[in-house]
Image (cartoon, rainbow, N blue to C red):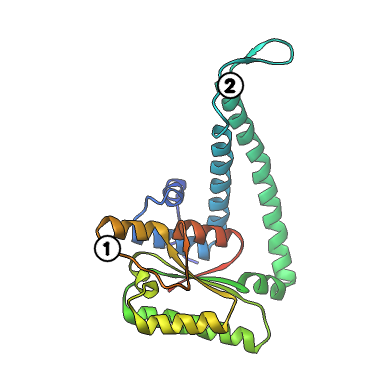
C-alpha cells in the first residue's frame, strides 16, 4: 500500500467531519478511510471525541447555584469540568479501541469468512456525477449486487445515496431512471435510495426546483450518512 497516497492529517479529518472540503478533497479522504483501517479508526476517534465534548456543552445554561453543602457552584465551570472529564475518559476509550483493533485483526486472520461477510452484507453506493453513463452504471451495479445476493440466499442491505450531480438520478423528470428505481424497490425490499438534503438545499438556493421520486428518501447529509455507515462496517463504494 502506498502510505503517502493514504496519509490524511488530523486537520483534514476534522475538516472532513465539518464538511468543509471540496469534492476532490472529500473523495481523497473517503478513499483513504475505505482503504486504510488506521485512517478509519482515527476518524472514529475524532468523531467520538467531538460528540462527547459537544454533548457536554449542550447542557442547559443556568446561574450559579448551591450544592448539597450550600457551596455555590458555577455552572459554566461545571460544563468545562465535564468536558475535561470526557476528554480524560476518551483516553480510556482510545485504549479500548486499540485493544479491540488488535483482537479484530487476529480474528480476521483466523476467521476471514465471517468478517468478510460482516463487511460486505451491508453496502452504501455513493453517486456524485450527473453523467448518464455513471448513473446507469450505478443502477446496473445495484441490480447485479441485489440479484447475486438473492440468488445465493444471502442477506444484503444496500443504500444508494446521491449528492451533487448525482441527484439527477433521483429527480422526478427522468422517466428512464424512475422506471429502473421503481423496479428495484418493488423487487428488492432491502434497497434504499437516499438524496442529500444539503445538496437539495444548495440547488434550491440557486433557484432550481428539486422534485424527487416518491421512492426516494432524504438523508440530512450524504457525508454524515456515509460516515455513519462506515462506522457500522458497511462497505463504501464510490460510483
Residue 143 point in image, percent of width and height: 51, 84
**Vertical placement of residue 132 versus 103, above or below:** below
- What is the distance, in whole Å, between disc 2 and disc 1 at their CAs? 46 Å
67 to the left or right of 130? right
Which element type, helix, strand or loop, lies under badge 1? loop
Quadrant of the rendered image containing residue 136: bottom left
Q: Earlier in the sequence, mark 2 or mark 1?
A: 2
Residue 115 point in image, percent of width and height: 68, 70
146 to the left or right of 112? left
Q: Which residue is most to the top?
A: 70
Is 161 in front, or is 117?
A: 161
Residue 159 point in image, percent of width and height: 52, 71
Which element type, helix, strand or loop, lies under badge 2? helix
Please report contact status of discs 2 and 1: CB closer than 8 Å, yes or no.
no
Find residue 208 and name its label: 1
Find residue 75 and name its label: 2
Q: Is residue 25 visible?
A: no
Q: Residue at x 56, y 26 (%)?
A: 80
Residue 102 point in image, percent of width and height: 69, 57
Question: Which dot, 2 or 1, sits closer to the camera?
Answer: 1
Q: Residue at x 68, y 85 (%)?
A: 153
83 to the left or right of 176? right
Is 102 in front, or is 127?
A: 127
**Vertical placement of residue 232 versus 170, above or below:** above
- Assign the C terminus to one quadrant of the image: bottom left
Is 90 in front, or is 127?
A: 127
Amino acid at each position: 500500500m502506498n502510505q503517502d497516497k493514504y496519509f490524511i492529517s488530523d486537520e483534514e479529518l476534522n475538516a472532513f467531519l465539518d464538511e468543509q472540503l471540496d469534492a476532490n478533497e472529500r473523495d481523497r479522504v473517503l478513499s483513504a478511510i475505505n482503504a486504510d483501517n488506521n485512517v478509519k479508526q482515527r476518524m472514529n476517534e475524532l468523531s467520538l471525541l467531538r460528540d462527547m465534548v459537544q454533548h457536554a456543552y449542550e447542557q442547559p445554561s443556568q446561574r450559579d447555584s448551591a450544592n448539597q453543602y450550600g457551596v455555590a457552584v458555577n455552572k459554566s465551570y461545571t460544563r468545562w469540568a465535564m468536558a475535561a472529564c470526557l476528554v480524560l475518559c476518551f483516553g480510556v476509550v482510545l485504549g479500548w479501541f486499540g485493544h479491540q483493533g488488535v483482537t479484530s485483526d487476529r480474528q480476521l486472520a483466523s476467521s476471514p469468512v465471517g468478517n468478510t461477510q460482516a463487511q460486505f452484507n451491508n453496502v452504501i453506493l455513493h453517486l456524485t456525477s450527473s453523467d448518464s453513463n455513471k448513473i446507469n452504471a450505478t443502477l446496473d451495479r445495484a441490480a447485479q449486487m441485489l440479484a447475486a445476493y438473492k440468488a445465493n440466499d444471502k442477506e444484503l442491505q444496500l443504500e444508494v445515496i446521491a449528492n451533487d450531480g448525482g441527484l439527477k438520478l433521483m429527480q422526478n423528470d427522468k422517466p428512464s431512471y424512475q422506471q429502473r428505481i421503481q423496479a428495484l424497490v418493488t423487487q428488492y425490499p432491502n434497497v434504499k435510495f437516499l438524496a442529500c438534503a444539503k445538496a437539495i438545499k444548495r440547488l434550491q438556493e440557486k433557484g432550481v426546483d428539486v422534485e424527487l421520486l416518491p421512492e426516494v428518501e432524504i438523508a440530512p447529509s450524504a457525508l454524515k450518512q456515509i460516515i455513519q455507515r462506515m462506522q457500522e462496517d458497511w462497505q463504501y463504494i464510490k460510483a
